[in-house]
Amino acid sequence: MAASKINIQLQLKIMYSLFFFIMLLEISISIFFPSVLLVKLAAIITLIGALPLLYITFKELRGKGEESLQNKQKLKNIFDTLDVAIWSHDLKSDTLLITPGIEKLYGYSYIDFYNDMDLWKKVIHPEDVYLLTDRSKRLARGETVTSEYRIIRPDGEVRWIQDRGFPTLDEKGDFVDFNSVLFDITDRKESEDRYRSLVEMSPDIIAVVSQNTIEYINEAGCRLVGAKHPEELIGKSPLEFVPEEIVNAFKIKGAKLRNQQVRLECQVKQLTGNTIDVELASAPIYFEGRFAVQVVGRDITDRKRTEETIKNMAFHDTLTGLPNRNRFRLHLNEVLNHLESNKILAVLFIDLDRFKIINDTKGHTVGDLVL
């Protein structure tokens, strides 16, 4: 592209030089040879010699013009197919440039925006107008600002717009113009609202931890640790509620499993000082543009108690609470497994209170009644 541009510039210089040469030639011949015919003839011959160069230069210039028009048309087609609009306002000349894509976003003709340069402000939802004050101040300082607000279309439909503003300041620091790129983010916002509703309504704990700080926690998580509002927990370290070894275990397992989910059971300390059993699962996510860990958990205190009760019933006599034959067999197997070779093991069975006679003669039912 650059080489072609240089080539055209060189050809133009040659053309100007030829015309200048023709003029000099015509003047020189007219001085030394007064014949007008001879002068005209020399100029014509020189011009005929330059015609190929003129033709090539014209053809290349025309080709470049057509290529430029094609590129502009391609760019226009791209903008026309995207739900994106570009707004450029030169404050010094009060010149406005708007791409037609704004019609898809706002539902108004882009001519309406030329006729009323404040139309974009007038259609902003009343509850979001307050955002403009801070936005204007930051743009005036030369900051790039991204704003998200709702607009009301002519048919009454409410849509979410993301507005990225890029200001320009002159050498004096005055705000001279700004450009905005506008996106329709309604689908994303609706998806976020649905996800937020699911998270808030979930009976399980859902929290986000970033840089060893609780960034978010739902109502279920608040109830679990005994807090009334999420604000009581946001900003605190998870080490205030979960043992440090558990946090380290999450980090170690997370590093090994990379982006996979990590599950652990631990005890969580409540604000009252009590501890409860909790099952936690964590996975890496991006939260508000930075790396974080999402933690999902549930209270398993009742389950743990039930498991302990079942385990106790399986290995202890329900009437006396003493270890039963299942517990004896389990213990015996453990001893045998750890018994060194060439060692002797003795098993003694002693009826200390001669209660076995009652069971053997009267039956276990009578024995249970006696107990």
Image (cartoon, rainbow, N blue to C red):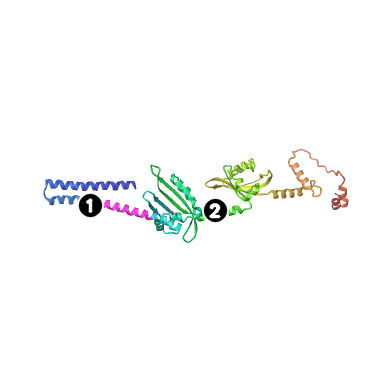
CA separation in Å, label 2 and label 1? 68 Å
Q: Amino acid at mark 2?
A: Glu
Q: Nearer the viewer, residue 358 or 193?
A: 193
Q: Is residue 249 visible?
A: no
The 10 Å Cα crowd at callout 1, few under 14, some 14 to 19, many 20 or more, is few
Residue 153 location (% of width, % of height): 47, 59
Q: Amino acid at mark 1?
A: Leu
Pointer 2 residue: 192
Residue at 39% from the left image edge and 53% from the top image edge: 97
Q: Nearer the viewer, residue 295 or 149?
A: 149
Q: Which residues are magenta?
A: 47-73
Is 96 placed above or below 141 here?
below
Give the main secondary structure of the magenta stretch: helix
Pointer 1 residue: 51
Residue 56 location (% of width, % of height): 27, 51
* Residue 55 belongs to the span the image colors magenta: yes
- The residue tagged with tag 1: helix, strand or loop? helix
Residue at 70% from the left image edge and 50% from the top image edge: 302
Residue 226 location (% of width, % of height): 66, 47
As drawn, is 271 to the left or to the right of 329? left
Q: Nearer the viewer, residue 34 or 44?
A: 34
- The residue tagged with tag 2: helix, strand or loop? helix
Q: Earlier in the sequence, mark 2 or mark 1?
A: 1
